[in-house]
Amino acid sequence: MSASVRIPVHEKPAEGQESSSREAPMFWEPADAEPGVLFHLQLLWQHRRVLWRASICALLASTLVAFLIPARYESVTRLMPPEGQSGSGAGMLAAMAGRASGIGLSGIASDLLGGSNSGALFVGILGSQTVADRLIQQFNLRQVYWASKMEDARERLARHTSLSEDRKSGIITIGFTDHDPQRAAAIAHAYVTELDRLVAEVSTSSARRERIFLEGRLHAVKADLDAAAGKFSDFASKNSAIDIPAQGKAMVEAAATLQGHLIAAESELSGLQQIYTANNVRVRSLQARVNELRQQLDKLGGDLSGDAQSEDALYPSIRKLPILGVTYADLYRQTKIEETVYELLTQQYELAKVQEAKEIPAVKVLDAAVVPTKKSFPPRLLIVFLGAALGTAMAVAWVYGETSWQKVDAADPRKVFAAEVFTTVMARLHRFSRRTGSVPGGKSVWSWRHRNEGL
């Protein structure tokens, strides 16, 4: 198969015409086939200076841009997968997390039915608005991000935060990127703290509800116990009633002893009175003993007239013990009931606290956040190479575009229309730039027009 070869011929310019500064390109072009690889290589070689300059400029510009972009540092925290929890507690907690993070009704329903695990629950809580607001207030991120509104600060915080869960291992990864490595590590650690706090706050498990109920009952029973103990103490102090049953038993035994001594003394006195006169010393001494025993026995037994107890008496009389015993037993029984209830509630309260701790998903840190020393962004070397490649590609595209434009016939309506539009636009720019005395690129409109027409 033969191919025709077109050889450029340099003709001598006619008189009055200037020789063209442009010469036809020296390359082979098949007449009956598409341009081959040699044609493209010769075209690029002819415009090698333009391509070289464009590549150098793109390289310098991309280098400048790469080093002007501020560096960012990423701090990462990894959490162990939470252990399996009870259905009710995990389901209600998942529903709360769904409501906090904006999950729809279907998501809440699936959580209640056990459709999501605790790992997805943790990720949802970490991305909730409550956690974001607490972090923004704690680290004053509105001032850091120059955000006048809370919504803008939340959006910037979300862009700098990455939350993910490994499907196989269940490990949760929390990453935070910031220009300050210290702040990046602090916020990554604060995410774990807020997660632990919020999980404990929004937990609505049965053990938590039981613990809250028992806590309220404990406060009420403690107040009742203090009131009953106070009444019992006042009654016992006012009536010298330390222990009515024990006191009654001791006083009855003491009265029986006194009664026995009194009977023996009276018998002995009766015998002496038959022998001696009333003025006898032994008779008088024994009579005084009998009188004293009767007086002590009267004190223990109480006054038959029902008068009030004398103020100098240390203990209540036997006749008053039954009356005091009723009130004493009532107050004592009420106090013991309150004590028993308080002890039982205290035991149940401690058990509920232990059960609540078991039902709440525990946040276990696998890798704690550390201050990063290596930047994560930008990849400066990649930016430089991509920028240089992009500049070179644009220059190659410009070369092919210019070559295609030159092949279009000058009488082609499309080329005429494009030249007219270009001339009009440049004329407007020329009139606009008269105030400054130049046009973009440092060339006049007519030079651009002549060059365009010469193509």
Image (cartoon, helix red, strand yellow):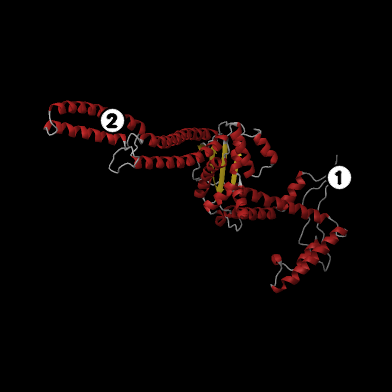
Percent of width and height locating residue 422: 80, 63
Q: Against 442, is 408 above or below?
A: above
Q: Quadrant of residue 307?
A: top left
Q: Which residue: 70% across, 64% down?
A: 441
Residue found 72% across the figure and 71% down from its top: 433
Q: How crowded is mark 2: few (under 14 residues within 10 Å), some or many (20 or more)?
A: many
* Residue 445 rendering spot, x and y as whole percentages: 76, 68
Work out whether residue 212 or residue 44 is closer to the camera in this orientation and state it: 212
Mark 2 highlights which residue? 255
What residue type is disc 1 on?
Asp
Q: Examine the rendered structure and indicate whether residue 448 appears above or below residue 322.
A: below
Which x, y percent locates residue 62?
62, 53
Residue 143 % position (x, y):
55, 57
Helix, strand or loop for disc 2:
helix
Q: Mark 1 points at which residue?
A: 32
Where does the N terminus fall, quadrant-wise? top right
